[in-house]
Image (spheres, rainbow, N blue to C red):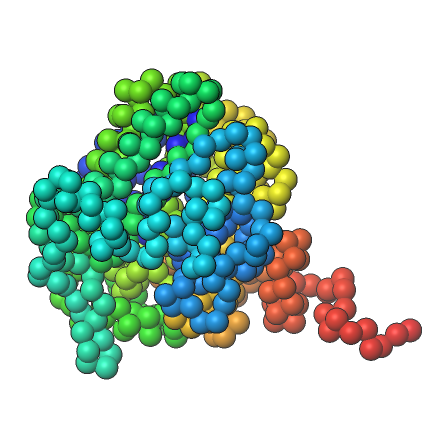
């Protein structure tokens, strides 16, 4: 079975037609969803690029692989995986797979994609590396103009300096965009793998990792202006007051300068983000169409997902950060396996589960992917026993900030050791505006979720559970929480 893995960066699930957006044109991903399995409750293990991508590579939760922060904002954590860490490409290579990765890597600094056996141009960093020699050669060969932006959109930072760049017009045709370049290189690799596979029968794994729709949104006019801002309904969470919330959220809102920009700018930013999503969908369509033209559709499983979501103004925030809201933790997840039914699944699943799924599809042992479970039984339409909750964690971005989250059907609990814990009723408060952690009406729910999170962290070996032993309603511990045993009978 060939494997085609498509990934975006910082992609809100509600921008896709398949997930209910009535305005954004995403026909190619919608078609993929309509012919495969769309997971409605697909979550990232952590809403930050490098740790999430490391979890995909290893099948391990971030606390276990210990690559906990992006290099660009690292606060002292590791910057590369351990030399002996299990990774799925090594297992696939042992089964004879060709390995290709076109696009964003962002899983360490010293070791790049080639270190793990992937072919493709080395494209480091968190955003489109528009000065990369291969991209410049691509432009030169086609007589296309270089990267240039105008009309930057920024707020004002708390110290009065210009805020982070959020969007700008890109003075290039679509064919010159980095997204078109990535799709072109992916198609070239796909054609080569198809030709070589026809001769020797070896399967391939080919990943295309787009850097977008991560901000800043840098788009040609046709996409920058594709959607009328009047179509944009800002989410109810722009009414966020941060009352009863961890203070870091208010600070992060100021960092992203949300309140320094008028409402019409916020609407325009969302409209531009939609344009970015459509641009990437079209490039994904080019790859899928070429796959079909090469006669590979019946022998290739296709997976599409993102590393995490994006706020785009929700909770008066941009980007991602130390707030475990659905906007950045729930992500798109689509898998099409030839011969399997088209369906929508409601189970809680994770980006980390893609690791075991890829291994399973390739006929490899899934056991080394410690925190991953294969999604193939769900894709086949089976109904196995499945966890009724999903866990996530966060370790910091700009500064250390530990968090753990458990989300079940109706409720979500977030443990923040430095300030206020959070409890949300997603049935009555889907936009997570009211923190009900101290609400006596939900004391039973709080205790139940606290105990369940504690148990799951202990099972995993995540030492965060030690904090909960004394600080949460977890009942009587069944071990010595001092780890000392000073007192003996």
Looking at the image, the residue that sits furthest to the bottom is 159
Residue 311: give x, y in percent of width and height.
30, 57
Residue 484 horizontal side relative to residue 171, left or right = right
Residue at 25 percent across and 46 percent down: it is 134
Looking at the image, the residue that sits furthest to the right is 489
Residue at 28 percent across and 62 percent down: it is 318
Q: Is the residue 3 above or below the residue 426 in the image?
A: above
**Can residue 327 be seen in the rendering of this structure?**
no
**Can residue 367 be seen in the rendering of this structure?**
yes
Q: Is the residue 481 above or below the residue 10 in the image?
A: below
Q: Nearer the viewer, residue 307 or 406?
A: 307
Residue 122: give x, y in percent of width and height.
35, 49
Q: Is the residue 47 above or below the residue 190 in the image?
A: below
| Quadrant position of residue 332 | top left
Residue 256 horizontal side relative to residue 476, left or right = left
Q: Nearer the viewer, residue 442 or 421?
A: 421
Residue at 43 percent across and 46 percent down: it is 114
Residue 259: give x, y in percent of width and height.
21, 70
| Quadrant position of residue 477 | bottom right
Residue 24: give x, y in percent of width and height.
20, 40
Image quadrant where one finds the C terminus:
bottom right
Residue at 48 percent across and 52 percent down: it is 54
């Amino acid at each position: 079975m060939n494997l085609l893995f498509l990934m975006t960066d910082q992609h809100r699930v509600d921008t896709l037609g398949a997930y209910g957006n009535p305005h954004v044109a995403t026909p190619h991903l919608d078609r993929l969803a309509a012919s495969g399995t769309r997971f409605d409750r697909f979550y990232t293990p952590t809403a930050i690029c490098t740790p999430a991508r490391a979890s995909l590579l290893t099948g391990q939760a971030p606390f276990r692989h210990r690559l906990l922060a992006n290099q660009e904002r690292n606060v002292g954590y590791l910057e590369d995986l351990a030399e002996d860490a299990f990774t799925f490409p090594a297992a696939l290579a042992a089964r004879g797979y060709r390995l290709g990765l076109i696009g964003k890597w962002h899983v360490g600094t010293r070791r790049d994609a080639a270190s793990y056996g992937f072919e493709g141009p080395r494209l480091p960093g968190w955003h489109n590396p528009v000065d990369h020699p291969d991209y410049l050669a691509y432009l030169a060969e086609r007589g296309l103009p270089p990267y240039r932006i105008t009309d930057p959109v920024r707020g004002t930072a708390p110290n009065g300096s210009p805020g982070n760049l959020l969007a700008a017009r890109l003075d290039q045709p679509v064919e010159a965009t980095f997204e078109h370049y990535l799709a072109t290189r992916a198609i070239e690799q796909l054609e080569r793998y198809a030709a070589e596979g026809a001769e020797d029968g070896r399967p391939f794994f080919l990943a295309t990792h787009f850097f977008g729709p991560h901000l800043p949104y840098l788009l040609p006019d046709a996409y920058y202006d594709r959607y009328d801002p009047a179509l944009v309904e800002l989410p109810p969470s722009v009414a966020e007051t941060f009352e009863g919330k961890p203070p870091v959220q208010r600070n992060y809102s100021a960092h992203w300068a949300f309140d320094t920009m008028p409402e019409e700018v916020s609407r325009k930013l969302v409209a531009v983000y939609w344009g970015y999503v459509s641009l990437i969908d079209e490039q994904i369509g080019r790859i899928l169409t070429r796959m079909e033209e090469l006669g590979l559709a019946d022998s290739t499983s296709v997976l599409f997902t993102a590393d995490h979501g994006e706020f785009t103004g929700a909770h008066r925030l941009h980007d991602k950060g130390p707030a475990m809201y659905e906007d950045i933790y729930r992500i798109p997840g689509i898998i099409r396996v030839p011969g399997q039914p088209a369906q929508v699944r409601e189970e809680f699943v994770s980006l980390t589960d893609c690791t075991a799924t890829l291994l399973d599809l390739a006929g490899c042992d899934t056991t080394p992917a410690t925190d991953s479970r294969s999604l193939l039984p769900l894709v086949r339409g089976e109904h196995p026993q499945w966890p009724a909750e999903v866990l996530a964690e966060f370790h910091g971005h700009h500064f250390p900030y530990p968090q753990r989250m458990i989300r079940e059907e109706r409720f979500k609990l977030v443990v923040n050791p430095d300030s206020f814990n959070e409890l949300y009723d997603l049935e009555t408060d889907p936009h997570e505006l009211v923190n009900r952690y101290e609400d006596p009406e939900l004391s039973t729910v709080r205790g139940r979720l606290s105990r369940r999170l504690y148990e799951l962290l202990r099972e995993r070996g995540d030492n965060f559970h030690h904090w909960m032993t004394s600080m949460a309603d977890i009942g009587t511990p069944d071990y010595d929480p001092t780890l000392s045993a000073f007192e003996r009978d």
